[in-house]
Amino acid sequence: MKNIRNFSIIAHIDHGKSTLADRIIQECGSVTEREMGKQMMDTMDIEQERGITIKAQSVRLDYVKDGEHYVLNLIDTPGHVDFSYEVSKSLASSDGALLIVDAAQGVEAQTIANVYLALDNDLELIPVINKIDLPAAEPERVAEEIEEAIGIDATDACLVSAKTGVGIRELIDAIVDRIPAPVGDPEATTKAIIYDSWFDSYLGALALVRVFDGAIKKGQNIKLMSSGEEHQVLDLMYPHPMKKIKTPAIQSGEIGIVVLGLKEVSVVNVGDTITDAKNPTAEPVGKYEPAKPFVFAGIYPIDTDKFEDLRDALDKLRLNDSSLSYEPETSVALGFGFRVGFLGMLHMEVIKERLEREYGLDLIASAPSVIYKVYLTNGDEIAVHNPSELPQVNFIDRIEEPYVRATVITPAEYLGNIITLLINKRGTQTKMTYLNEDRVMLEYEVPMNEIVMDFYDTLKSISKGYASFDYEPIDFKVGDLVKLDIKVAGEAVDALSIVVPRNQALPRGRVLVKNMKELIPRQLFEVAVQASLGSQIIARETVKSMGKNVTAKCYGGDITRKRKLLEKQKAGKKRMKSIGKVQLPQEAFMSVLKMD
Ligand code: GTP
């Protein structure tokens, strides 16, 4: 056990986590240069294209230092805050972490959020300043920022270039020297945490575990502590970059893959503790909480016949993603679909994209919403995931909404605009730190609903792309909130309802109908777009009629031109949904998020 090192890599997006992981793997000689061809740490297609790490992948590496053999377990973390529960469990399985910061960019918001999680887990942090090959690299300045923002000593930070390989061997030596060996009792009964799980079509549900005490052995009957379910261990493997290596046991201090031959990944939940069925351990490793969705959206097939196909696709995605939740929902406007719960905005985008790309579905999504706790005058408490389901005002005693702790790091020149934005978003400042004379770190408590609404894009545009942002959910607080409804041609469109602060209802209603007016294509008749609070209309715009048929002007003309025009109209219609006689494009459903 003394020669094992379990470590994670934490970094802001694009600071070079995957590139560095691949370099370390290569340096440890597990794979040849040729096999390095494509990045190995990210395995899913969408990850490759977007360059983000969604599902944790870990590897066991061999390394020799001063004639001594070491096992290095690189524990990959999802990195993005949407998956913060999974990140925290990966970190709980590590004994140290490499904190990567881009030498040209400096500390960013996601670095901070991940560092908090690492410090919660008492991890030894090794600051790593990457991309020192860049002409704009300023390693000393970045080291100071790390000290200022995080309060750790960065004088002995490792300076590397994951691209050229400079400093990589020194970094691995530092991992061996500075990260403590795992502690645990090899003689005690089995105690291991599941820090990742997925579905393999041959082997069934797989659990990636870190063993703390005792060992997990092939043939052993184990118990999953949260559910009390017992299963036999069919097989055990070490994760290797190119293949899986079978082993008869995973010992105390090690990581490995447990095969239980189960068809449902939801049985092996991240955060759960595995112990011996006959002789269970008294305490689980940390508290287990099932994944909680924070963002909800209605997802509907454009073609109503595809409802069952959508259900099948969601069922299949859930096999591999137990954090995905959904239930059937009917919308007057959109027909039959599902209300789907996501961990965050990125999770939502990824799922939507996979449904469309991998399952060939044409979908329309309602604007995302957070969850509201509504206390009724009769003393009941209900959770509302869909703004259109908010009860009438006279039944409501009070509404509580979720808040997040938002971290923003920005060049000082944009500070004023960003503070104004955060105030407009109902934020309260809890911290402001100058990382150096021209970079500032802000911490605010902000209603999560405001983050879902158009926050990120606005932040990027007012800071010319320089400000970085990250958040984590904190708690629920009372808000003075009302439901704003939208009517198109006199019909209320349930999928367009949103919840807004009472004092913003009027300006938001005006902006919304104006935006909708721009988005609704002209029809053969005049269309009224109205915003209302209950039965009171607070804003109205009119989409003028287009007068005559667009094809009319082709009469007598060239038939191919006419066909082209019709084709174009058809393509445009693909993402339209009929509301009564009016065709609404997908953008109309998202326009409720736009603030201006
Ligand atoms: P996510 O997986 O999206 O979080 O990103 P990441 O942190 O894994 O970053 P990734 O490894 O994908 O690197 C981001 C970009 O930086 C890529 O274009 C890399 O080629 C580049 N990059 C990584 N390390 C270095 C380096 O040392 N020097 C230079 N010049 N570029 C680097």
Image (cartoon, helix red, strand yellow):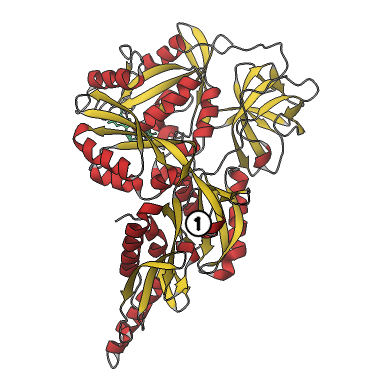
Q: How far from the left and from the top, in percent, is residue 154?
A: 32, 15
Residue ID for mark 1: 387
Q: How far from the left and from the top, in percent, is residue 521?
A: 34, 74
Is residue 276 rendered to the left or right of residue 532? right
13 vs 141: above or below: below
Going by the picture, which residue comes out furthest to the right?
278
Is residue 359 rendered to the left or right of residue 448? right
Is residue 28 rendered to the left or right of residue 377? left
502 vs 50: above or below: below
Q: How far from the left and from the top, in percent, is residue 576?
A: 43, 70
* Residue sitting nearer the eye, 322 or 58: 322
Viewport quadrant of the N terminus:
top right
Q: How far from the left and from the top, in percent, is residue 419?
A: 27, 38
Q: Residues within 10 Å of mark 1 (few under 14, many from 20)?
A: many
**Residue at x-position 53% and y-position 55%:** 386
Q: Amino acid at mark 1?
A: Pro
576 vs 242: above or below: below
Is residue 218 rendered to the left or right of residue 451? right
**Residue at x-position 29% and y-position 56%:** 596
For the residue labelled by badge 1, is the local secondary structure a helix, a strand or a loop? helix
Q: Quadrant of ligand 1?
A: top left
Q: How many marks?
A: 1
**Residue at x-position 22% and y-position 33%:** 411
One can see residue 57 in this view: no
* Residue sitting nearer the eye, 419 or 189: 419
